[in-house]
Amino acid sequence: MSEADPTAPGARPGTSAGTAATDAAGARPRHVAEEARIEPHPRGASTARALVARLLAPVAPSTVVETAVLLTSELTTNAVLHARGEVVVRVEVVGPLVRVEVTDRSTRSPSLQVPRLDASGGRGLVLVEALSSRWGSRLVGGGKAVWFELALDQR
């Protein structure tokens, strides 16, 4: 996957921030974090996917990167489709965990529902529930954050 272009549709230039710190042996970073502000446009999910892939590829197994990209896409798409205004995607590696948080301006909590077999959508949270180590949501100033975590040692 290519690196996120801050001038691409759905991205806002100059709105990413990142940090990294490696352990004493120079092994896998113990803490990596970055966030991006995404305009509420259908192409915003691709910006979020690129951010996750770029940040995690050097520090996580490919299976974890692929799962994180998929789940980030689902949460970002939900935020873009159902919330008003800007979406913020934050990706963080802390010790043995990857945590992705998608914040939007809706205060409506996500609801896990099993869709009908012939439904064209509604499977995003089912995937998050099935593939993440854990997930949840919380209210934040004027909106909500929906997050998931993955263990870096997944196979």
Image: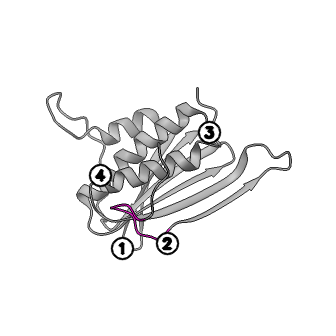
How far, Cα to Cα, is label 3 from label 2? 26 Å
Question: Is any part of residue 153 visible from this angle?
Answer: yes
The kind of secondary structure element at disc 3 is loop
Residue on which the image places disc 1: 142
Query: Quick one: label 1 or label 4, which is nearer the N terminus?
Result: 4
Residue mark closest to the camera, 3 vs 1: 3
Residue located at (29% from left, 52% from top): 78
User: Disc 3 vs disc 2: which is toward the camera?
Assistant: 2
**CB of mark 1 within 8 Å of CB of mark 4?**
no
Q: Is residue 20 left or right of residue 17?
A: right
Judging depth in this view, the residue of 29 and 83 nearest the camera is 29
Q: What label sits on residue 14 in the rendered view?
A: 2
State the residue position of label 4. Answer: 78
Q: CA distance from mark 4 to mark 2?
A: 24 Å
Amino acid beneath label 3: Ala
- Residue 10 vs 135, above or below: the answer is below
Name which residue type carries label 1: Gly
| Mark 4 or 3: the one toward you | 3
Q: How many marks?
A: 4
**Label 1's element?**
loop
Number of the front mark, 1 or 4: 4
Distance in Å between CA atoms under marks 3 and 1 = 33 Å
Q: Would you call the spot at circle 3 few (<14 residues within 10 Å), some (14-19), or many (20 or more)?
A: many
State whether the magenta stretch is mostly helix, strand or loop: loop
Q: Amino acid at mark 2?
A: Gly
Residues marked 4 and 2 touching at CB (< 8 Å):
no
State the residue at coordinates (18%, 27%).
117
Badge 2, how many Cα within 10 Å: few under 14, some, many 20+? few
Q: Residues within 10 Å of mark 1 (few under 14, many from 20)?
A: few
Mark earlier in primary sequence (3, 2): 2
